[in-house]
Amino acid sequence: MTEKKFKIEQKEIGGVNPVYFIADIAANHDGSLLRAKKLIRLCAKAGANAAKFQHFKAETIVSDYGFKKIGKITHQKKWKKSVFQVYKDASINNAWTKELMKECKKNKIDFLTSPYDMDYVDSTNNFIPAFKIGSGDITWHEIIQKISKKKKPVILATGASSLSDVKEAVKKILRINKKLVLMQCNTNYTASIENHHHLNLNVLNQYRSIFREKIILGLSDHTEGHNSVLGAIAIGARVVEKHFTDDNNRIGPDHKFSMNPKSWKKMITESRKLENSLGDGFKKIEQNEAKAAIVQRRAIRAKKFICKNEKITKDKIEFLRPCPKGGLEPYKYKNITGKLAIKDIEKGDLINWKKIK
């Protein structure tokens, strides 16, 4: 099966290309443009390929009335402010957009965002090389189609979604746009170690089976550490998104489960090691083990001195290391028994076709 490949900006992703890492700064700018720029610099230095933000206005993403009605649940229980106020504090001034893009360019990484309303889809379009659609909007087909029509790569997270949700969203996108990264995701943001039990990385295998070469696999992850990232890469993820901050102890909705510069750099280092370890998937004797094959494999050897014209029998041979070029593997012994030696063969020497007839 041919693996899907396409470019985000000038970087090709998918196939055997290195994994594309997205540092999701999200709300970790804490309302400060200067801080947002600082995080861009830090994630670039730590090895990120892109810095991602979230463009929204509180009033176009959450209902103040609605959240007051149901109360705080899941990770929001720990928020000291109302849900509406948290989103308001985390919102990005549209005037930031160009500045964020410039900072990303200066640090040689891509600038990405998730636009959470129709106006932001249009206003951010000229500044980004690809769109990210958050898990929460997987059933909002209108915005999915609007984003897809921009003809830029689409990165779709699938947290808290059923397979039918995913299939419908993918269908909407692929009818319009053939450049799709489909990310497995779990949208529990509590930073609990128990979340690893629910990440279900093997869903990536299901996505590959269903959508085949139509998509590039990815992971949007909110668990601590990078074990899940390594697992996803081993399965086939070629795009990885993790939240990024400079201090996990800061107050805010995303800091606790985010990676920091030190942990991000370690994740990149370990991921690149893993990529090198995965190889091309075709079994062969690798270049670096060719000599090991000689010293570790057994060859057919003379168990005792064999005279010229003497018949080779099972009791006159044994299987011992090494097996250099010209040596015969043990499973070929039946092919040589009954043959005659055409020269004297020393005890311990190889028995091969040059010495028998």
Image (spheres, helix red, strand yellow):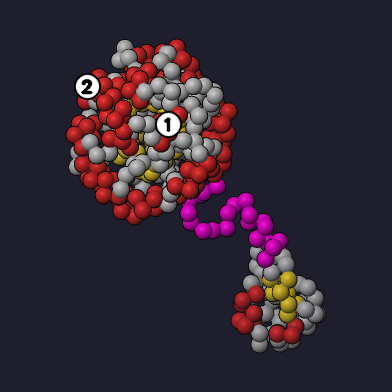
| In the image: residue 69, left or right of residue 274 | left
Frontmost residue, 200 versus 144: 200
> Height in image: 42 above or below 171?
above
Rendered image quadrant of residue 352: bottom right
| In the image: residue 79, left or right of residue 177 | right
| Residue numbers of the magenta segment | 276-297
Callout 1 environment at 10 Å: few (<14), some (14 to 19), or many (20+)?
A: few
Q: Is residue 149 magenta?
A: no
Amino acid type indicated by mark 1: Lys
Question: Which quadrant is home to the C terminus?
Answer: bottom right
Q: Position of residue 257 (x, y in %)?
A: 49, 32
Q: Are marks 1 and 2 in contact (CB under 8 Å)?
A: no
Q: Is residue 295 magenta?
A: yes
Q: Position of residue 214 (x, y in %)?
A: 29, 47
Question: Which quadrant is home to the N terminus?
Answer: bottom left
Amino acid type indicated by mark 2: Asp
> Height in image: 72 above or below 287?
above
> Height in image: 199 above or below 44?
below
Image point 40% across, 25% down: which residue?
Answer: 26
Image point 61% across, 77% down: which residue?
Answer: 332
Frontmost residue, 338 versus 282: 282
Q: Which residue is denoted by mark 1 in the rendering?
A: 77
- The mark that comes first in sequence, 1 or 2, is 1
Image depth: mark 1 or mark 2 in front? 1
Image point 35% across, 25% down: which residue?
Answer: 83
| In the image: residue 4, left or right of residue 197 | left
Q: Any mark on residue 119, and which?
A: 2
